[in-house]
Amino acid sequence: MSPAAPTSPSPRPSPASTPSPAGGIRAPRLLDWRVRFGVLALIWGFSFLFIKVGTEGFAPFQVTFGRLLFGTAVLAVALVVKRDRLPRGARVWGHLTVAALLLNALPFSLFAYAELTIPSTLAGICNATTPLWGMLLSLVALSEDRPTRVRAAGLGLGFMGVLTVLGAWQGFSGLDVTGTAMALLASFSYAVGWIYVRRTLSGSGASNLSLAGSQVGLATLQLAIVTPLFTSVPESVEILPLLAVIALGALGTGYAMLLQYGVVEEVGPTTAAMVTYFIPVIATAAGVALLNEQLTWNTPVGAFVVLAGAALTQTRTSRRRPANPPVHREKAADTDTTPRDRPTARV
């Protein structure tokens, strides 16, 4: 549920072992990538439930600050264990500060405020619109990423799904417009953040873990400044909301990010990005089963249409191979920087 700044992709390793930076072979992973993929989908799907429960005992900014704080703690431990270094250079840290705002501080806060008035199921579905916003923005920001007819159709289909979820034919009756707009704006912020990261932090030389830990740490500092200005210390702390915030941060922001980059490293970003399509399904199931949230027919139908449209926007046209392929064709493929080479975790 916590996107982080990616670096240039690396060739896909074999499932059994992973090349180390020094050229050796790392030890085989204890869990198959499919298991870790499923755990990642569950964690991010349940994150919307954790937000809902957390806001029952804390102000939205406090929920966001708590999740960032516990997420930073997990990533800091990982940095120490792996003896990874923080990024260097004022330019990189400046871009990370903006990325922290767009990918963490702002969307996390918006989702927390949104769930004061909308169900967690709707928030999870709104989160799935990020690929749609990303494609729409790429038409302007990324000149090399022009849409095909299929992707354009996916964009239109996806937003039709959004209107279905919101019940547009009923005049949005019974819908909290402000909360829904906040959730959609959070997803839009993710899309803007990913484009910003792609244009500014690609090839920074720092590891994914280093960039992720630094980004989340900067977002924590941002919320540490904002939270006291708009909230006051709770008179009492309830155990269930506190546990929800801890789980949201330690699992949904810290541990999940480590899982994400492990899966990306092993099977590639295209396969790893498919976790996006499981998140709203799990969020909806969790909200209905555990929070007794009401579900009308247009919500699952619209969600399916949104996911179908989002999937179409991620399709790529096959590239024709030249009659005389260049000698370094494999190396060129490895340095391709189109969006499919980027991890796209969204929550």
Image (spheres, rainbow, N blue to C red):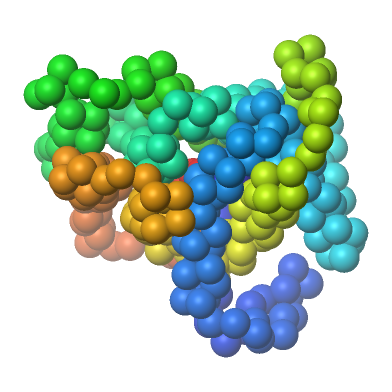
Residue sitting nearer the eye, 195 or 4? 4
Residue lying at 63% horizontally and 41% vertically, measured from the top left: 54
Residue lying at 54% horizontally and 82% vertically, measured from the top left: 32
Q: Is residue 12 left or right of residue 296?
A: right
Q: Is residue 160 left or right of residue 215?
A: left
Residue lying at 57% horizontally and 31% vertically, measured from the top left: 112
Name the spot of residue 105 as percent of width and height, x first: 65, 28
* The quarter of the displayed image where residue 237 is located: top right
Can residue 222 be seen at all in this image of the molecule?
Answer: no
In the image, is residue 29 above or below residue 235? below
In the image, is residue 33 above or below residue 258? below
Residue lying at 72% horizontally and 81% vertically, measured from the top left: 26
Q: Is residue 269 left or right of residue 240?
A: left
Name the spot of residue 174 as percent of width and height, x first: 26, 23
* The quarter of the displayed image where residue 160 is located: top left
Residue sitting nearer the eye, 293 or 124? 293
Q: Is residue 269 left or right of residue 140?
A: right
Residue sitting nearer the eye, 170 or 105? 170
In the image, is residue 245 above or below residue 133? below
Name the spot of residue 138 as percent of width and height, x first: 36, 28
Counting the numbered discs, the total is 0
Residue farthest top in this picture = 229
